[in-house]
Image: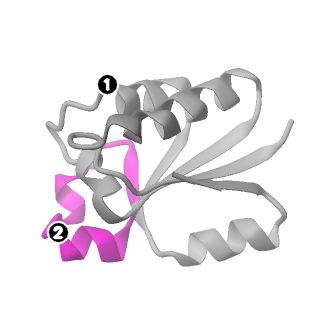
Amino acid sequence: MSNYLLLGSRDPFSSVDAGFVFDLAVQLKSAGNDVTLLLLENGVLAARTGAQSPGLDAAIAAGVVVKADDFSLKERGIGPQRLKASVQPSSLDLVVDHLAAGHKTIWN
């Protein structure tokens, strides 16, 4: 079993390949790995309550830990109370912590 940090920065509503990170998260989790998905930049748009993002919903259902960059949320006027229940705000320190721990990191 490995530890993965996936970074999703693309808007899933306007980028054709944004779903890649959600699919990869589900595949890695299904293979028995620990997976954390950090949404940042326009990727945080999928984390809003009521946002129709089947890929993100599948990742959450698969047990992927989902975080949203707090700076990206603030820049887009999305308060923590407007996030899906399973998504927690996080600082970019999370990336440093995962890298320092030797986790495999993929940015999309």
- Is residue 78 part of the magenta span, yes or no? yes
Viewer-side residue, 86 vs 19: 19
Residue 93 coordinates in the image, percent (x, y): 57, 78
Left-right relation of 94 to 52: right
Mark 2–mark 1 Cα distance, whole angstroms, equals 21 Å
Quadrant of the image containing the N terminus: top right
What residue is rendered at 27% in x and 44% in y? 46
- The residue to which callout 1 is attached is 54
Q: Which mark is residue 105?
A: none
| 103 vs 69: above or below | above
- Is residue 55 part of the magenta span, yes or no? no
Q: Which mark is residue 76?
A: 2
Residue 57 visible in the picture: yes
- SS for dot 1: helix
Chain part drawn in magenta = 69-88
What residue is rendered at 35% in x and 72% in y? 70
How would you rate the neighbour count of disc 1 (Cα within 10 Å): few for under 14, some for 14-19, many for 20 or more?
A: few
- SS for dot 2: loop
| 71 vs 68: above or below | below
Residue 107 coordinates in the image, percent (x, y): 57, 56
Residue 63 visible in the picture: no
Residue 69 coordinates in the image, percent (x, y): 40, 67
Amino acid on which the number 2 mark rests in the picture: Arg
Q: Earlier in the sequence, mark 2 or mark 1?
A: 1
Amino acid on which the number 1 mark rests in the picture: Pro
Mark count: 2
Q: What colour scheme has been applied to the protein in the rendered image?
A: one colour
What residue is rendered at 77% in x and 47% in y? 3
What residue is rendered at 52% in x and 28% in y? 23
Residue 108 coordinates in the image, percent (x, y): 51, 51
